[in-house]
Image: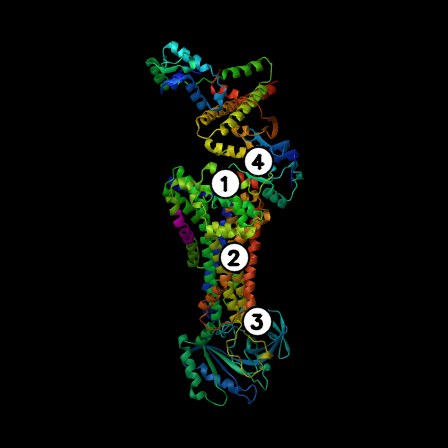
Amino acid sequence: MSATGNESMLRTRGLRKEYGKEASLVRAVDCVDLDVPAGETLAVMGPSGCGKSTLLHLLGGLDRPSAGEIWLAGERIDQMSERGMAALRRDAVGFVFQAFHLMDELTAVENVELPSLLAGRSPRAARRRARDLLEQVGLADRARHLPSQLSGGQRQRVAIARALANSPLIVLADEPTGNLDSEATLDVLQLFDSLHQTGQTLVIVTHDSRIAATADRLISMRDGAFVDDTRLTGGTVGNLSALAGLDG
Amino acid sequence: MQQEVVLALLAKEPSHGYQLRARLRDALGPLGDAMNDGQIYVTLARLEKAGQVAVERAPGMPDRPDRKMYALTAAGQHRVSEWLTEVSWPKPDLAEFHLKLLAAAAAHLADPIAIVDAQRRELLRRLRDAQRAAMAEPRESEAALLLEGIVLRLQADLRWLEACERTWTKRKASSRRGQ
Amino acid sequence: MGKLIIVSRLVVRDLRYRRGETAMLVIAFVAATATLTLGLVLHGVTSHPYQQTRAATAGPDVEATAFPSRGGPPADRAALASLTPLVRARGVTAHTGPYPVAFAVLRAAGHTDAVLAEGRGQAPAAVDQPALTQGSWVRPGGMVLERSFADALGIRAGDRVTLNGRSFLVTGIAVTAAVPTSGVGFLESSPQFPNPGLIWVTRTAAESLATLAHPLGYLLNLKLANPSAAESFANIHTSGGSYRNNVGNPYLLPWQDISQQDGQLIRSEQQIMLVASWLLALLALSSVAVLVGGRMADQIRRVGLLKAVGGTPALVAGVLLAEYVAVALVAAVAGLAAGRLAAPLLTSPGAGLLGTAGAPPLTLGTAGEVVGVAVGVSAAAIFIPAIRAARTSTVSALLDAARQPRRRALLIALSARLPVPALLGLRLAARRPRRVAANAITIAVTVSGLVALLFAQASVGVPDLGATGSGDPGQFDVGFASQTERLDQVLLIVTVMLAMLAAVNAIFIAQATVRDARRNSAVTRGIGASCRQVAAGLSAAQVLPALAGALAGIPGGIGLFAAANQGGYSGTPPAWWLIAVVLLTVAGVAGLTAAPVRAGARSSIAEVLQAEVA
């Protein structure tokens, strides 16, 4: 799998996910068309229950759509076998969960090396890569700490490092700062920003406007469908001074 | 620029005008770059008139504004102490936007939701810029703290705009049903 | 009173909320108590079978047989004459016979065997009236077989057999106290007729069976005023001078000898039953302990909630105890009933062990024991955890701190070098070492039992009662086939029960493991492990401890058999049988746990993770 230039890294057509039957039918994702070029940071915002998390689960191969197509780096993934999807989650997609979902009994470095081990890398190579990633997220000195010994922000950073273990084509983050205070949020923000600088394609689902503001593009979702799609550019520092109360 | 800020800046020791300018710039970081240089001298002149600041002329210096030495008078010092204990806070200004929406809806001039969305987009852009500026500064620096404040206020405003969107959407839906 | 209501309400709600788990718990409890019941019943029944038969058939205190010496005239009444004085001897209160007896050759359904045919009349005898288990008593052209002999040959009432070439109809099957229950190797035998089986025919038929080579003998049954004096009576009248003559001494057999021989003969059976009953009981108790202990881990958080809303430690402990004791009581009653119903499988005359008529005794004592044990074990198993749970601070209980798995750095480092399924399996096992140990121990106990039973079965096949002399044993099927066949049936049933209980345990442990590993499995799949890898890991976490337990069960079983078998005779089953047991056990565990494992590995990742966050 690879993508070049302005080709879409991620594309969906008519994506749908439904639960229940007839009277109790719930359309979590309703006919979504999406195009994410390589290297873009996309933020998806919306009220709770609007289906943004479900959408992300579909994009990451954690769930199967009821209808529609998903293309990742030119390959169709919505009808893959379970095995194929597992390989997808391992090599092509890095997922960051709101609840971190780290293994409690593994240290930070052991958590981060796990996807590499699953991919069949030698233990030594996996360990080395894990250490590099932990350094990248600024937690090299906490490598041997258990999750219970880390703060929320640190745990999420370990989770992000884990998501990067196999150099995924795209990183999907589901409310990454939902459980974090503002200081930890800043840390994660900076991390996402640096990832963006390296050209990583990012799709972030969030209700935090700060996270959304780091994105190149913002999509608003309501009741399972996209209602707005904006590019975020512009403004000058002059505007900021006004916001600070410094006028003329 | 509030006058009391300049007074407070003089509380430490008498300073030249350019020194005050420099300290302000440091404290404001990137926001300080857009500051009007001349503004501070206007403020100093006003304060002198009000008797809160006195000019000390360095002996043998020509009479130029940037070479003047300014110092607090007793009245000035009193005012500073008073100011430090005041708990007034900058006024929020939401009423204008609120009325804008109501007027647009009542007169059918525009879709309130569209107005809210447009405002949201603008605020998001500003948030993005503020955030970028904040991240460019070293952490724990004074400028970073100020920028953090801007970001958080914008965030709060955005939350209110989201609430506006929700309410106006419901209002539209129910009015449609009513028709 | 209010407390009682609260406690019962909480207990009922919880049981109803976790319906699936409660059902599994009840099933496992019922299996355990049924097993325990059967074990106890078995234990009771093997004690005094001979006495029961003796009472039911008015068994003789002394049996006297006399055969004319070889070379004398056939159908000689001299043998009869030697028996007649005994009838009037001192101490004799009643007698039946003398009955004519003759050796003969029986052919039936491909078997050839030696028999001793006893001639009887139609009317019931006062002493030694055999009790029919099938069909009706002798009549012309018909014969009745002794039960163990009939079992060995596989003959039922209504079959046709030949006796010395003449066709006879088997009119019935009966048990008697005149021979040991196994009916083997006890009767008067001659070299040409080793270990004959006992049959009854009409008097005329018996007389007609006598030949020149094997003349007719006579058999007399005596009842004494003092049955315990039978041994001395036999001593006096056997070696008494007046009976030493050329005709041939009568052979006197007191009932104690028969009883003792009976005891010896079935000692192997008894030992096996004893071993089996203890094994079953042990397995039953251990499975209850595992079940209850396993559930405790889930309860800690519930304890926290109870305390957070104001429950006192006493209330909390009370709720926990009440819940398990309630389940144990219900299950114990159901298990008792199941055991009671299943017991005849092992002890009914038709299926074959012991000659007792009627249903095996399920005394109030036994029932009380079973219920008491079930309740006691579950209370004990939960006592300490309940106290600890009640003492835990509310906060840590809510945070479920007690459930945090311990970290095994060495195992984690080691597992990194293994292929993915082994990596996952080892880490999974390392999280819950106690459960792994419980799994291994259960399997070890089961396999020990199976191995011990195999050894027992091999031992029973070894003939221990005097290989008959110079005659040609190959000519006749040897009579103790009946014993081994009955034993085989019993062993089979006990084996099946052991296996069933172990199977229930294995499934339960597997389910608990899968449930415990739900979140981790989902996360591991979320970061790229395939369904198959996760399933293999879950499976490995079950199968490898089972393998270890099975291997440990071989020496365990050998030791168990050696400890139980103080009678001396022992055989060894072929080595490949032992290997087969291990392999079958492991395969069985893998097969049984496949379903919960697959279900666990296939669940929707998104759903599990959402649920875990909630």
Find residue C64 and report its horizontal and vertical position in percent.
Answer: 48, 80
Mark-to-mark CA distance, 1 and 3: 81 Å
Check disc 1 and give the amino acid type: Glu
Q: Which mark, residue C152?
A: 3
Tell me: residue C403, above or below residue C568. Answer: above
Q: Which mark is residue A198?
A: 4
Query: For the residues carrying marks 2 and 4, which lies nearer the camera in this image?
Result: 4
Q: Identify residue for label 2.
A: C546
Q: Which chain contains the residue that carries disc 3?
A: C
Q: CA distance from mark 2 to mark 4?
A: 50 Å
Residue C207 seen in the figure = yes
Mark drawn on residue B154: none
What is the crowding at mark 1: few (fewer than 14 residues within 10 Å), some, or many (at least 20)? some
Circle 3 packing at 10 Å, graded few (<14), some (14-19), many (20+), is many
Is residue C383 magenta-colored? yes
Quick check: marks 1 and 3 in contact, CB under 8 Å? no
- Of the numbered discs 2 and 3, the one sitting upstream in the chain is 3
